[in-house]
Every structure is written in structure tokens, then in C-alpha cells.
Amino acid sequence: GHRLLIESMIKENKNVLIVIGSIQESRTNKNPFTYQERKKMLEICFNNSIHILGLEDIGSATKKQWADYVIKEVRSKGLNPVLYYAGDDEDASWFNMRLNVKKIDRVTKGWGFSGTTLREKLRNNEDVSDIIANEKILEFIKDIKWV
């Protein structure tokens, strides 16, 4: 689903920024990869077509607080975000009224699996080649040790 969003962003925009949240977390059920691993996989898939910014969580933030934090941090890098790509209504609701939002249904137009499925397979040390088609990504993650 995220790949679909990013491919749409690249196709439709001159400059694309991907913000990776929860960079302080890794090897958890929700965030199995480190920030550096997530960043590297994006670079492998999208080469120089995107810019990447990592942000730590800010605690028990509300949707409004998180969206304001993200926008503030992006602007602190000299960028002026105007459009946010969302994969579902819940995601879109975080940035409504702050940025223009474009929703791309990553669930029904995606590849037929969820991130949860991938995370479960990784945690159980199962083969993920049926989910990850990119050979370079498969090669990259093959030596990662899952706890």
C-alpha cells in the first residue's frame, strides 16, 4: 500500500518528501525495522526520486498535535508542504484542514496484503518473497535478525 502511494506521489509531483515516524522504535511488532533500514529500503526502491525525513514520536499526541508537529518539522528544513497523500480516511483525517489531502485507496488498490501480514511473517521468520517482489529488498533484509 505504501508503495502505491509513493509511486503516485512521484508520478504526480516534482518534489516528494517521505516522513518516517517512530524512528526511535525498532524490532517491535509495529516497527520491525530500524529507521536506517526503512530509509535504505526506500532508497533502494525509489532511488533519488524522493527525499526522506525521520521523526521521533512526541508521546501521546492527538491527531492535531501530530500533524502540527510534522508540518513544523518539515518547514524547519526549509520546505513548504502543500499536499499530503493518504492511504485511507483515518490517515487523511490527521492532515485535513492543514494541507491539501489526496486519498489513494491503498487497501483495495494495493497488492492484497497488509503491513500486519508482513510483520507477522518477519516475526515468525517465514519467507516473505510472496509479499516483497523487489529482489534488492529481499537481499537487504535476509540477514536481519528478528527478535
Image (cartoon, rainbow, N blue to C red):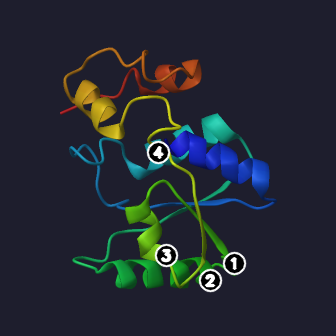
Are dots 1 and 2 in contact, CB under 8 Å?
yes
Badge 1 or badge 4: first in the primary sequence: 4
Could you tell me which residue is drawn at 46 percent across and 48 percent down? Answer: 36
Residue behind mark 3: 95
What is the crowding at mark 3: few (fewer than 14 residues within 10 Å), some, or many (at least 20)? many
Badge 4 or badge 2: first in the primary sequence: 4
Are dots 2 and 3 in contact, CB under 8 Å?
no
Q: Position of residue 100 (x, y in %)?
A: 63, 75
Give how far apart the Cα atoms at labels 2 and 3 are: 15 Å
> Which dot, 4 or 3, sits closer to the camera?
3
Q: Where is residue 40 in the image (x, y as percent from the top left)?
A: 54, 42
Could you tell me which residue is drawn at 47 percent across and 38 percent down? Answer: 108
Badge 2 or badge 3: first in the primary sequence: 2
What is the crowding at mark 4: few (fewer than 14 residues within 10 Å), some, or many (at least 20)? some
The numbered disc on residue 75 is 2
Give how far apart the Cα atoms at labels 1 and 4 are: 22 Å
Q: Is residue 50 in view from this perspective?
A: yes
Are dots 3 and 1 in contact, CB under 8 Å?
no
Residue behind mark 4: 38
Residue behind mark 1: 79
| Snapshot quadrant of residue 145 | top left
Q: SS of the residue at dot 2?
A: helix
Name the amino acid type tagged 3.
Phe
Q: SS of the residue at dot 4?
A: helix
Could you tell me which residue is drawn at 28 percent across and 27 percent down? Answer: 122
